[in-house]
Amino acid sequence: MAATVLITTAHGMFGGALLQQLRLRPELQVRGMVRRRRADDVDAGNVRWVEGDLDDPASLIAVVQGVSEVFLTTPMDGRIAARECALIDALKVHSPQARVVILYGAVDHQGDPLVTQHQQAIAHLQASGLRWTILSPNTVMETALLLQAVSVPWGVVMGCSGEGRVGFVALDDVVRVAATVLACGGFEGEELVVTGPEALSMPHVCRLLSLELGRPVRFLDLPEERLAAMLLEDGSYGSAQQVETEVLCHLRAWRRGGAAIVTDTVARVSGRQPLSVAAWLQEQRAVFARPRRVQDHLIGLLLRLRFGRFALDPTA
């Protein structure tokens, strides 16, 4: 009998990318769980879409029936623990033979409330009697670096992470590891820390970006409060709490060395070497290489005049 894999939040970044990976494994039956099915969520090949809501435990009963592997992730807000525990409890009753691959995170956030919620859910999973594997990616390039594309035409990238190094990992490498574990088994009771091949600081990333684009891109290491004010002023984030949760807590962890983690997990599990930042930037060149307009030059000049004293060059 074909194994049945349930992917929660199949419209999300990790869930959506994993579903596409598992389409290539016809030996598996895949259930993509979403709150509401969209018009383009068409059952095809080995993929079937199901509706379920992690905030409504009763809706999970039919979703988990007969699954053998589960990829569990949830939106990053104040209900992480409640949602993940609800699915774990449904599995305990209705599919106790299932193994849960739960998404965590490798970066050391030192007691951040969202991390604490993840830890509560993991403790609940480990005490549940279900089989489990923890998948802990380092900082994903698609979330951390693509956001910088807006300021690259100005010749700058802005942050507050200093010389802190990060083992940036490509989304494809994370989901390739997840797909291998779900399809092939093994690694039960383990935490798989998934990283890229090296840990680089943002000044180093900017140097690589400069080489790829053939023009200088400098890293401005702003004071934390100045960066937060800019993000609020330009409307990128709706509240100071959102800036803290989605930006500052991560950059703070980078600065103090909480993301300087490099492992061989991608090669060991998937049999392929992880993508480097340089190779990823080459793949994403079109995103960063938007033609520069006159206003881009002017904005860049103003930023360098105002914040040039915060520019950091990569150290050896």
Image: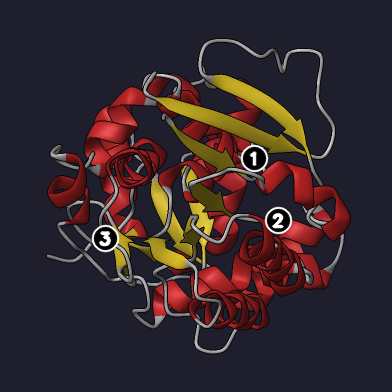
Q: Secondary structure at mark 3?
A: loop
Relative to residue 40, is residue 79 depicted above or below? below
State the mark number for residue 12.
1
Name the residue nearer the viewer: 2 or 191.
2
Residue 99, image x, y percentages? 45, 57
CA distance separating discs 2 and 3: 25 Å
Q: Residue at x 51, y 18 (%)?
A: 46
Could you tell me if the residues under marks 3 and 1 are in contact, i.e. CB atoms within 8 Å?
no
Q: Amino acid at mark 1?
A: Gly
CA distance separating discs 3 and 1: 24 Å
Name the residue nearer the viewer: 312 or 108.
108
Q: Amino acid at mark 3?
A: Phe
Residue 70, image x, y percentages? 52, 49
State the mark number for residue 75.
2
Residue 172 located left or right of residue 5: left
Q: Given the current orientation, which residue lies at the most extreme front position?
A: 1
Q: Secondary structure at mark 2?
A: loop
Q: Which residue is mark 3?
A: 187
In primary-sequence order, the first of circles 1 and 2 is 1
